Each structure stands twice: as structure tokens, then as C-alpha cells.
Image (cartoon, grey):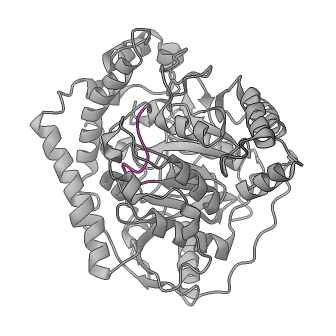
Amino acid sequence: MSSPTRRDFLRLGVMGGAVALSGASAPPAARPRRAPSAAPHAFEFEEATLEDLQRRLAAGTLTSRRLTAAYLARIAALDRHGPALHHVIETNPDALAIADERDAERRRGPGARGPLHGIPILLKDNIDTADRTTTTAGSLALAGSIPPRDATVARKLREAGAVLLGKANLSEWANIRSPRSTSGWSARGGQAKNPYVLDRNPCGSSSGSGGAVAANLCALAIGTETDGSIVCPSSASGIVGLKPTLGLVSRAGIIPIAHSQDTAGPMARTVRDAAVLLGALVGVDERDEATAEAARRGASDYTRFLDADGLRGARIGVVRKSFGFNSRVDRLMEDALAEMVRRGAVLVDPADIPHAGEYDESELEVLLYELKADLAAYLAALGPSAPVKTLADVIAFNEAHRAEELPYFGQELFLRAEEKGPLTTPAYREALEKNRRLSRAEGIDAVMDQYRLDALVAPTGGPAWTTDLVNGDHFSGGSSTAPAVAGYPNINVPAGEVYGLPVGISFFGRAWSEATLLRLAFAFEQATHFRRPPRFLPTADLTRP
């Protein structure tokens, strides 16, 4: 049997069948804003935005304690019972006490710290919190592990006044264990479900973060991405997800796959809320040298870049080679492109990325080398109480607990990573150099320079596939790999539905272009309003495409 390639592993950035469609048709009238669907579980704060919540908190008609209690009750009703979504691994036993502290600050001083003050947020279970919640990447090998200090992301959220509500489920070890994995499954959290259609997959690895935001189990969530793991769950669950430029947000205290591509990012129901959350995460961190330029390149308030007319005059390149894997998705994308033209954008079509697909295998090679080294460094930082010390220890643990850890798929990628040498190995260094050169200067930067583009657009992925623990995932197509390998920003925005399953569109571009991408994404969102809450259907209604 041939060894698994990077395409076997992530399959999120797979270029579809290269069906080159014609340019956008005459722009239709803007689609009317949809009324929220009648969900079977009424919730006072369904689809509430940060602006909605802060207005009520400031007026005194709502407290952070009542808001936090409402989300905890919602988790109990929908995640533990009812549709049993499995989006939350554990809730924070101190969440209500933290909410009380935020309420006291608001009443007695010094007042609200900012737009996240008193807001309940879920963190993916690979982000360290030095509190009474554990950080395990969904694995029983780290069960009970409480890090000695917060991840920088968690610390910054606390400083912003947020209530850390708990930990979101994920694809175990951020989906790096096996090329035959099922996204959204972890030994600790079980199988996460797509909240729109329960027998469908929420995509990974930030499956719990994306599904929880979509199902209104939290106000906001933090995900992480190596390749596709923020934007794909966001597309599959009909929300906004932003993977930042590598180095804009600190990676310190996040269980790693690979330092050359890993980053945390915001997941929200609106572009504005994602912009607010991103601003709270940005900054230089002495624990992460990649953030050295974050203060100069980033912003503490990305909402100032949002403009409902922000598509006017923008030059946007259409990555046609990412189309063609699903005819219904193609039709949604054509409608989206036509709407952009109607709103004043200038499309360059096609504007395909040079060398896309040429670094699929070398991407995986780099990830495997870095996984072995980076995971060892993370585990060492846990101190002597760490239940496992190396990747080899994790592999041995999984073998000793096969019934719990390996019931559906194996750990082939772990085994391959364990065979790799140090990061001084020439094969690793050559693969890393190749990936960066082909994806950056000779890839995204080259096409954007050639056509003087502000951004590139492509379908984020296809409609959610049926969860299949026997055969694993069934990715159909996507566009995440080039910006992921380059370390460049990428934002998903809802773009419609296929058989009631959300489909997203990605805006991505040069390093540090978050402000531009948020402006374009916000203008598209305001023109279309495709986001609607899930109805938790047991299976897809194939009579309504």
C-alpha cells in the first residue's frame, strides 16, 4: 500500500475537478434578508450579537451571570441531551463566579473593560487554561492535564473581561493522527454532529468551536487551524471564521501540530463579531517569536475597517481551479460573484494560484517533522506532572488503550512522524523552503501582483458529508491549502445552502491583510445575509435543494 499523502491527510485544500466555468453571469438583484428559522429549542439569546448583548449589559437589563447561566443551560439541553451535539467537552466550573466578577466590575468600577466584557466564550480543547478545566486535544492520554499557565490567547481573553465558558470538542489531536480519520471525533468528546443536519459532519478540526457558535451554545469561540481547521468547520456550520496571518496571534500554550502553519483565530456568527474578537487576540508575545511584527502589522480594533460598501472598486481574483467539485456549490459561487460585481467589485476571472497542488506532499512532510519536535516541547513545558512526555509516549498510550482511542481509525500519521529526525534534517529544511517559496512569492503574492488584486476568492468547501466512522471523511473540495501553507489570512463567510447544508466562500490574500479581507467579507455579508440558525434536522431533506 502506498504511503498516505497530504491529500489523504487533510483533504481540505483539494483542488476540485478543474472544471473551468464561464465568468459570472449578469448580476441578479440582491437576495432578500432571510428571517431566522423557527428552531425547535427556543432560546432568548439566539443569534445575539456582541452589540446586542453589550447594549443590554450596559443598560442593566441583563447581567453576565444570567447570560452565562443561559448558555450553560443551552449546552445541557442541546449538547448533553436533545440532539446531543457533542460540541463541548467540558464546561468551566468557575464560569458563573467569573461572570459575577465581571458584573461587579461593571457596577462598582472600573466598569466594562471593552466589547468582550462579561461575554461567554468557548475555547478549543487544545488551548491551555490554568484553571479547573483540562487541556487535552480530545485525547485520554492528557486526561486531567492542567497546564501551569494560560495560553496567551486565554490570558488576553481574560484581560478583555471575557468569561471562559469551557472547552470545545475537536478532531482529536487536531486531526493529525490518521489519514482515515472522522472529523469531529475525539476519545474524550465523542462524535460531534453538524447542527443543521445531525447525521452530517461538522468538519474539523475546530468542529466543536464551529458547531457551538452555529447552535448558539456560546456567544463566540476560538478555533485553531493548520490547514482548513477554522474555515472548513465555519463553512459547514454556516458561520464566520478567520484564520489570521501566522504571527498575528500568539501560538504560546496551544497544543501544536506544526509551528510553521498553526494559528488560533475567531469563530463567530457575524463578521463584526469576528473582527472584535480578533482585535482582542492580536499582540506581541515574548513566548512566541513569530509575533514580533504583530503590534506594527495588526490592529486592536478591526471594526473600524468594516464598510458595507467595501466591495466597491475592489479588485478580486477568482481561483477557478478551486471550483468544479460540486455543481450546486458552483452555482452558489456564481451567484456570489455576480453579487460582488453588482456591489462594485472588479473581478479578475480566472486568477489561479501558480504552483497550487505542487506542495501537497511536502506540506505533510513538514507537518510530520514539526509535530514530533513541537509536541515534545509542549509536553516538556507541562512539567513533571505531564502524563505523557513525547509523541512516542502518546503512541504507546493509544496502543495500550485501543478500545477507547483506536476504535474507528488508527495513528498512521503519528507513526510516520515518530520516524522523523530533528528539525536540522536537510529533507525537512528543503521541504519547508519549497513550501514557503511556492505558496508565497511564487504563489499568492505572484498572482496578486500580476493582476493588482486586493483579495482572492474561492469556495471554502462543499456541503457537509454524512459522518462515516467506518470509512472516514469524504471531503469533496476546498481552497484552504495555499493560504495555510503560506501562513496568510483566510476568512470564510456564509454563501448559501445546498439541501439545507451551509456552504461558505473564502476571501484570502497577502500576509497581514486582515483589514482588507474583513472589509470585503463584511460588505458581502451585508449584501447577502445568508446566515441563519440551524434546525437540528435528523437527516437532509433532499426534496428541497
Q: Is residue 450 left or right of residue 231?
A: left
Residue 163 lies in what quarter of the image? Answer: top right
At 53% from the left and 71% from the top, the residue drawn is 519
How many dots with numbers?
A: 0
Q: Position of residue 255 (x, y in %)?
A: 43, 30
Q: Position of residue 463 (x, y in %)?
A: 58, 56
Residue 97 lies in what quarter of the image? Answer: top right
Q: Position of residue 91 (x, y in %)?
A: 69, 27
> Residue 491 versus residue 475: which sits nearer the camera?
491
Residue 233 visible in the shown view = no
Q: Tell whether position 416 is magenta.
A: no
Q: What is the span of residues highlighted in magenta in the rendered image? A: 244-252
Residue at the far front: name it: 109
The correct choice, above or below, for 398 with respect to 102 in the image is above
At 31% from the left and 41% from the top, the residue drawn is 289
Which quadrant would the C terminus be assigned to in this image?
A: bottom right
Residue 22 lies in what quarter of the image? Answer: bottom left
Residue at the far left: name it: 426
Q: Position of residue 61 (x, y in %)?
A: 89, 49
The correct choice, above or below, for 523 with respect to 498 in the image is below
Residue 325 visible in the shown view = yes
